[in-house]
Structures are given as C-alpha cells and as structure tokens.
Image (tube, rainbow, N blue to C red):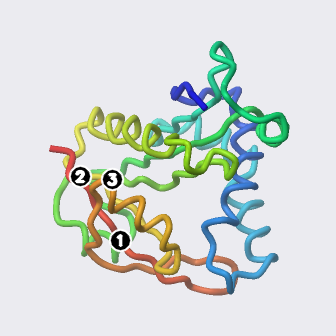
Amino acid sequence: MTVTIRPATAGDAEALARLAAVTFPLACPPSTTADSIAWFIAEELSEVRFAEYLADPERTILVAEPDRTSGAGIALADAQEVAATGGLVGWSMLVSTDGGVPADDDAAASVSTRPAIELSKMYVHPVAHGAGIAGSLMAETLAAAAATGAAVVWLGVNQENRRAIRFYEKQGFEVVGTKGFRLGDRVEHDHVLEHALR
C-alpha cells in the first residue's frame, strides 16, 4: 500500500475522529474498561475536539491516506474498513508548548533538552500494520517537529504497549523516564521517550 502523507485540514476532522475511534483502543492496556475507552474517545478524540486541534496553531497534525492514483494495493475488505474511517490510514499530532518545556511535570523532569515538542498521538489503522506506513509517517512527523525549531521530540507510551515501544525504539527514541496518564478513573503508567532532532 502506498500512501500520501500531508498536513491535515479542517475538512479532515470527521475522518480523524472515525480513525481515532478504531486505533485508540489498540493502544490501551488489556485492563482498560470499555467505558474508560469510550469516555476518552468522546472527550479527546471526537470530531469537535479534532476541529479544535486543527484550529490550534500549537498543534501539527499529519495524516496518511492511500494513494488512489497507484491502485493503493489494498484488499477490498480492507478498503471498506478504511472507507468506514473516512479514507485515512494513519495520523500523528505534535504539540508545542511555551518555551519548549513539556506541560507534564514528569515529562519535563525526564526530557533533557529544550526546546522540546510532544508527539502526542501517532496511530496507524490496523489494516495497514506491517505495510511500512508507520515508519513513513514517523519520518514525516520528525521532519515537521524539526521544522518548528525543536531540539528534541518526546512522547508517552503505556508501559504495557510493547509493540509501540519496540517501534519507537527502532525509530531512534530512548526511554528517559516515566509519567502518569489518566484514562477514565485510573492512572496508567507510561514510559517517557525522547528523540534528538539535531
């Protein structure tokens, strides 16, 4: 499957919300309740929230969509799943903060360099796992992060999400600390990872 990676536009809010509803549960630990997942999606990953994110100059959202000019190389059933999520197969979101200091206190204590930018979200549709899309999306996301003038990009990932941790480490991220992440009525335990941009 070949994809085009581009900056998201206001017109992508609905598709981003649909895709996020499919991808976010995959990143949650097995002990996470369906109610907690549904709450987070409704509060943080709704179409309304994406419209707000897309209008926020401190956020950069990139999307990956199948390249329709090349036939996309995607099976019919998979194409139908992608169509159901608005035609996108991946997305990422960077968040800048004043002075490049992470807003999370634990992350601020762990991330060694300033200015820093947060890779808040990065997800790929499950039908596209293993197709190289995540690596391409990460490369474009790191380039976008570097273009902001940040010296380092950081992220939080659940300590039980071994697949994601392996991926991030393969992309050059290193574990530098830990932080909490509220999901419903629980606080999950995340690793803080960072990647130098210069």
Quadrant where the image shows the C terminus: top left
Q: Looking at the picture, which amino acid does disc 2 mark?
A: Val
Q: Is residue 63 left or right of residue 75?
A: left
SS for dot 2 = strand
Query: Of 191 and 95, which appears nearest the observer?
Result: 191
Query: Which circle's residue, 3 or 2, is located before the other in the chain?
Result: 2
Contact between labelled residues 1 and 2, with CB atoms less than 8 Å apart: no
Question: Which mark's residue is nearer the viewer, 1 or 3?
Answer: 3
In the rendered image, the residue lying farthest to the top is: 69
Q: Residue at x 63, y 30 (%)?
A: 65
SS for dot 1 = strand
Residue assigned mark 1: 192
Q: Residue at x 17, y 66 (%)?
A: 112
Residue assigned mark 3: 171
Image spot of residue 14 (x, y percent): 77, 38
Q: Residue at x 29, y 60 (%)?
A: 173
Image disc number at residue 152: 2
